[in-house]
Image (cartoon, rainbow, N blue to C red):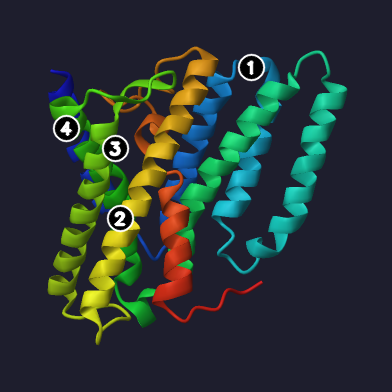
Amino acid sequence: MALKTRVITSVVGLVLLAAVMVFYETIWFNLVFLAVCVIAIHELYVAYGFTNKQLYVFFGCIVMAAIVMLSDNEIVVHWVRPAAYLFVLFLALCVVIKFGNVDFAKLSGMVIFSGVVVFCFYSFIQLKTLLPKAEYGFDATYFVILILAYAWGGDTCAYFAGRAFGKRKLAPKVSPKKTVAGAVGGVFGSMVIGLLVTIIYVQLVGRFLGFERVRMTYYVLVCAMGAVASVLGIIGDLFASAVKRQCGIKDFGTIFPGHGGILDRFDSVLLVAPFVTFIVTMLFYNLRLSG
């Protein structure tokens, strides 16, 4: 039953993703990912034991997240640095003025994890900014799907490989169910699924990104990226599991039946999205970052 619920949730998630990609070139794309950030940060807010008495902490994090996620706008981008400074000042004042109500360790944990979340989802916004459709076609869409294929595909393969062959535990104190065999299966799964996504994309659009003359080289790069991305996905998953254990909770939320909350579903994406975006920026295109 649990597996059936997970599969149904995954299918619904993919349908929602397809709907979001329809609005890829509009502000709605940013707003959807901002909404995801808001839910994830709220999950952290609850996990770290904050209550309605500290709602100002939650709203402070949300304002900073909104400025970052909308920073592809020419006006908003100029506010990122001043906002970051004001946010740090705000946190310092929270600790000083609300000394009896705000635990610095909890506040630090929430802010750091929130930063990881925003950094992850901003990677999708950056792909949109760096690879506009008018110049690069659907390449940015392909990379968004590739990121999720690496993370979720590898996670799914790790799940089945672990159930079939898993004996030796990978990190028993953090996540008792994860095994070495599952991790290996996840690595190979990410490589294969990433390769399949690439082949399908090439067949659909009739061209091969920025590597038209060296297709085999690009396929090798996709596999190499998949291997690294899978390892990063495992680290992100274990990181989230470690936080949950220290907070004394099983899941971050219940928004996805069979999967938990936003962070339970996207924990394997946290470190993969920035990594793929870095590689795209450095290797695949001659991109110049402004600012």
Q: Mark 1 vs mark 2: give the one in front.
A: 2
Mark found first going from the N terminus, 4 or 1: 1
For numbered disc 2, what is the local secondary structure? Answer: helix
Q: Position of residue 14 (x, y in %)?
A: 23, 45
> Dot 3: within a 10 Å radius of its alpha carbon, few (fewer than 14), some, or many (20 or more) residues?
many
Q: Mark 2 vs mark 3: give the one in front.
A: 3
Q: Mark 4 vs mark 1: give the one in front.
A: 4
Which kind of residue does numbered mark 4 sit on? Phe
Real-space CA distance between mark 3 and mark 4, rounded to the nearest whole angstrom: 10 Å
Q: Position of residue 113 (x, y in %)?
A: 57, 35
The residue under label 2 is: 226
Please give the name of the residue rendered at 26% of the width and 51% of the height, measured from the top-left corner: 149
The image quarter in which residue 182 lies: top left
Residue placed most toward the observer, 198 or 17: 198
The residue under label 4 is: 160
The answer to whether residue 267 is left or right of residue 154 is: right
Which kind of residue does numbered mark 3 sit on? Ala
The residue under label 3 is: 183
Real-space CA distance between mark 4 and mark 1, rounded to the nearest whole angstrom: 41 Å
The residue under label 1 is: 52
Which kind of residue does numbered mark 2 sit on? Gly
Q: Is residue 56 above or below residue 290?
A: above
Mark found first going from the N terminus, 2 or 3: 3
Please give the name of the residue rendered at 54% of the width and 27% of the height, measured from the top-left corner: 44
For numbered disc 1, what is the local secondary structure? Answer: helix
Q: Position of residue 82 (x, y in %)?
A: 77, 55
The answer to whether residue 30 of the structure is visible from this angle is: no
For numbered disc 3, what is the local secondary structure? Answer: helix
Real-space CA distance between mark 4 and mark 2, rounded to the nearest whole angstrom: 18 Å
Q: Quadrant of the C terminus?
A: bottom right
Residue placed most toward the observer, 69 or 202: 202
Q: Position of residue 287 (x, y in %)?
A: 49, 78
